[in-house]
């Protein structure tokens, strides 16, 4: 397998692309010295920004409280209707247990 001969049109386009990339790199200038975010000087927030942030935080915390409340509600005992059924079942089980432990079946 041989490599095709170099096409002058493709070479010209590649050279233009390289030049454009170099121009863009020059336009950006040298990269700034890297500095960790916690060492960078703080930009003071405007009052409006601060209030907006607090508003969002309050909304988020309120939503979390509501979720927590309803999460706890779902673990509470079931309504009375359910408990009536289970009480009847308990009564039957108790009666059967008494029968089993008595001598009534010997008679």
Image (cartoon, rainbow, N blue to C red):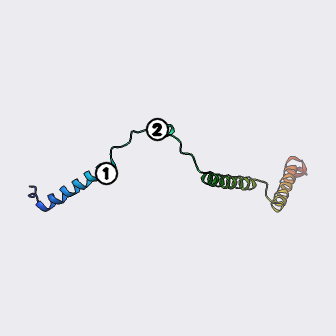
Front residue of 37/5: it is 37
Identify the mark nearer the N-term, 1 or 2. 1
Q: Are marks 1 and 2 in contact (CB under 8 Å)?
A: no
Q: Relative to 42, is 5 above or below?
A: below
Task: Tell me the number on the disc at residue 71.
Answer: none
Image quarter where the N terminus lies is: bottom left
Task: Tell me the number on the disc at residue 27.
Answer: 1
Query: How many numbered badges does the structure rendering display?
Result: 2
Spatial separation of the CA atoms under disc 1 and disc 2? 25 Å
Q: Secondary structure at mark 2?
A: loop
Front residue of 30/102: it is 30
56 sits to left or right of 18 = right
Where does the image place residue 45, in percent across and percent down from the top left? 58, 48
Task: Tell me the number on the disc at residue 36.
Answer: 2
Please report the residue visible at 85 percent of the width from the left and 58 percent of the height from the top.
88
Please report the residue visible at 82 percent of the width from the left and 62 percent of the height from the top.
81
Disc 1: CA contacts within 10 A as few (<14), some (14-19) or many (>=20): few
Q: Relative to 36, is 6 above or below?
A: below
Where does the image place residue 53, in percent across and percent down from the top left? 62, 52
Front residue of 100/16: it is 16
Q: Secondary structure at mark 1?
A: helix
Where does the image place residue 86, in percent across and percent down from the top left? 81, 57
8 sits to left or right of 38 = left
Where does the image place residue 12, in percent across and percent down from the top left? 15, 59
Residue at the limit of the structure toward the top, as seen here: 39
Q: Residue 5 sits in which quadrant? A: bottom left
Please report the residue visible at 82 percent of the width from the left and 60 percent of the height from the top.
85
Please report the residue visible at 25 percent of the width from the left and 51 percent of the height from the top.
22
Q: Residue 84 sits in which quadrant? A: bottom right
Disc 2: CA contacts within 10 A as few (<14), some (14-19) or many (>=20): few
Labels 1, 2: front one: 1
């Amino acid at each position: 397998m041989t490599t095709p001969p170099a096409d002058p049109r493709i070479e010209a386009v590649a050279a233009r692309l390289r030049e454009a990339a170099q121009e863009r790199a020059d336009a950006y200038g040298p990269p700034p010295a890297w500095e960790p975010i916690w060492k960078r000087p703080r930009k003071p927030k405007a009052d409006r920004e601060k209030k907006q942030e607090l508003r969002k935080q309050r909304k988020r915390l309120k939503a979390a409280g509501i979720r927590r409340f309803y999460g706890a509600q779902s673990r509470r005992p079931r309504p009375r209707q359910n408990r009536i059924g289970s009480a009847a079942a308990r009564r039957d089980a108790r009666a059967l247990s008494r029968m089993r432990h008595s001598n009534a079946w010997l008679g």
